[in-house]
Amino acid sequence: MKSKLAIAVSLSGWILLVAYIFYDYVVYDDQIISHFFQPPYRYELFFHILIAIAPFISTVMGYLVNKRIELLKSVKESEKKYHDLYQNAPDGYHSVVPDGTLLFVNDTWLKMFGYERTEVEGRMNLKELLTDEGLKGFEKNNPLLKEKGCIENIEVDIRKKDGTFLPVIINATAVFDEKGNFLRSRTTVRDNTIKKGYQQILERASEEWKATFDSMPYGVMLLDSECNIIRTNKYISDLSGLPFRELISKKCYDVIHHEGKPPEGCPLEKSVKSKNTETLEYYEPLLNKHFMLSITPVFDEEGITIAYVHSIIDITDLKGKEKKLIESRNAFLNMLKDETSAYREQWALSKKLEVSNEDLQNTLTKFKEAQDMIVRSEKLASIGTLASGVAHEILNPLNIMSAIVQVLKMESLPQKMAEDLDEVMNQINRATKITNDLRTFAHQKKTVMSHVDIHNIFDRTASLIEHAFTLDNIVIERAYDKNIPLIYADEDRLAQIFLNLLNNARDAMKGRKNNIINVKTTLVENGMEIRFSDNGPGIPEKILDKIFNPFFTTKDPGQGTGLGLSLVYSMIENHGGTIHAKSEEGKGATFIIFLPANKKTTGESSDQV
Amino acid sequence: MSDKKRVLIVDDEYAFCKTLKVFFEKQGFEAHLSTNGEQAMDMIKDLHPDFMTLDIRMPGINGYEVLEKTKWVDDNIKIIVISAIDVPTMEDSLMRLGAKAVINKPVDLNNLLDTVKRLLS
């Protein structure tokens, strides 16, 4: 018995009994027993019996009181527990009525979102705390909750007091009254920040990998052991011309080889057996390309193969270069052979044949360069001869047409006809220009070499076109090296070189804004360097080695003859100089000219160019 | 004999000669044409034109020869060379041989007319 009240109640019966016996003893002395059982009045007997059983009654009552108190205590304690559970549960809890008003929320909820209880319960509407997207979700899920009685794992963002949004997961059940009307929700709200964070990291990582694979300059496929494509990259999609969706679960040999069966020596079959990386050089006749195929198995933690990584590298260019190298080497060896037979006696030659492999390679490279130069020069020369003959033959008919058109134009003609004649005249002028350009090749004009100031020549050339360039938003910047001396060169040709390069840059930058052509001269060993840079669209790498070839043009038909840069090339060559171009697509182009300084003696001997 | 100025057109392309003839007649000249050097020499002797347009590349007697020979027949004839050959390189030698002007093909007729007027004035 823990409660004092219960003890008091229990003892009260005993106290009553003892008190009465004491009273009887004082009043009746030795007749106490007889008085107790035979009182003078009958009702007294009833009273005596009552007193006699009073201790039992009080004890029972004390016990009951004690029970009651314990019950109350335990109820209080469990209520405290539930209260704590409710208020401080690890998840937030709220209850909303159908219109969205928050009926009550727990402490965790308040802590999560930073609101005060007084501003929330019965006052705030959940809808105010949702994003537009969340609001749509609410409008959709609320009827669902009413209908099904519960909703699960709804991801939603709820606005905190500081204005930021907290991503949470919501689970809710519905509370109905006896008639089945939807009263309110019981909703748990779980902080989803970490999970969402991981999700974002995963998504980003996945995106990054996808981008990485897609940007690879070769094909990558993930295959199962049956050659089915599980995953692939953009290269494969481009190569096969099929979108990603259609590639998945196709056989890899259907996509690449179009044969309906794996190619001979398929590295996948080998790799399945060897569990190692296997490679194969493969020629695909349909695409006319050489590929390096390789298969690498991917293992899980227990060492079981789960997939195969199939990479496909286009080695057509390499193959071509290899072939050319072999051809050049054979040609060179044949040449050496001929020489050997002719000068067999000469012991020096036998030594030559013992040239180390490395030397041979160097010689080959030089040989190749020389070959290129000869090819280019020959091309230019033959075009020159052709051009001079053709130009005269073409100019005559052009002349007749031109004259006829001009005479016709003197008549009063219908407007339409006059316009057409103008167009004919335009076309004649166009053909004339092309023919004249062509003839410049054959133009066996004597070079007039003298000591000239290169900066002065450039300035005079630029002054001819600078006004027109301004209209095309082109600024010509100059960075002259004042230390450059007079050089021995042909003034007219230098002017022609500058003019062609300037026009070339202008054509490349047409229609663009803030165009800059930068001309920088530098004194270098044995001569000078002129760098012509523009900030136009640049020259694609694949055509960089072709731009000096005669008739190579990127312009629309009729816009250029493709001779401008090859003229520049040959004119610089005639000066004993060199020109080459550097460019990164999208970052403009730079032409780098080297002109030798003061080569007066060689200058005179090459007068007849 | 009319007081119109007389022109002789010499070019191995008949179509060109004919067109130039029409042009000069429209401009009030008396125009004659010849498509080869031999005939041209005969006509120079007969007609004594005031001026003459002359092609250089022609079969038979070519423009150079006509240019030289004309000097001996009639020194007063103003000769305008109209040619498709590369003019800048040849201009000097043609002028030395007695040409008064050298015009590139295709001919700009306005330019030609200006030249003629300049030479006859």
Image (tube, coloured by chain):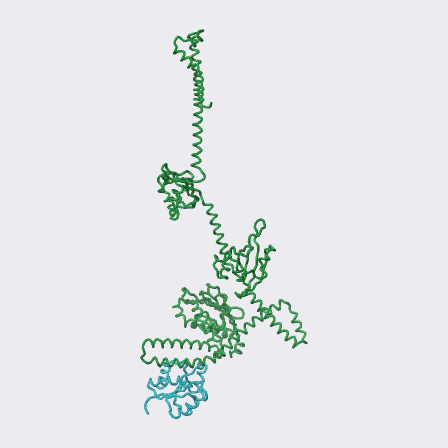
Chain colours: A green, B cyan
Residue in the foreground of this view, choosing between A38 and A54: A38
Q: Is residue A264 above or below residue A494?
A: above
Residue A51 quadrant:
top left
Picture quadrant of residue A63: top left
With respect to residue A555, does A249 lie above or below?
above
Residue at point 67%, 75% (across, down): A346
Q: Is residue A132 visible?
A: yes
Q: Nearer the viewer, residue A509 or A453?
A: A509
The reply, left or right, for residue B92 in relation to residue A414 is: right
Q: Residue furthest top?
A: A30
Q: Position of residue B27 (x, y in %)?
A: 33, 84
Front position in the image: A168 or B37: A168
Residue A145 screen position, x and y as percent: 39, 43
Q: Where residue A430 sits in the image (x, y, percent)?
A: 41, 75
The image shows residue A1, relative to residue A86, as above or below, that is: above
Observer-nearest of B64 and B88: B64
Q: In terms of image quadrants, where is residue A24? A: top left
- Residue A120 in view (yes/no): no
Query: How many marks on residues?
Result: 0
Residue at image coords 65%, 75%: A340
Q: Position of residue A136 (x, y in %)?
A: 38, 47
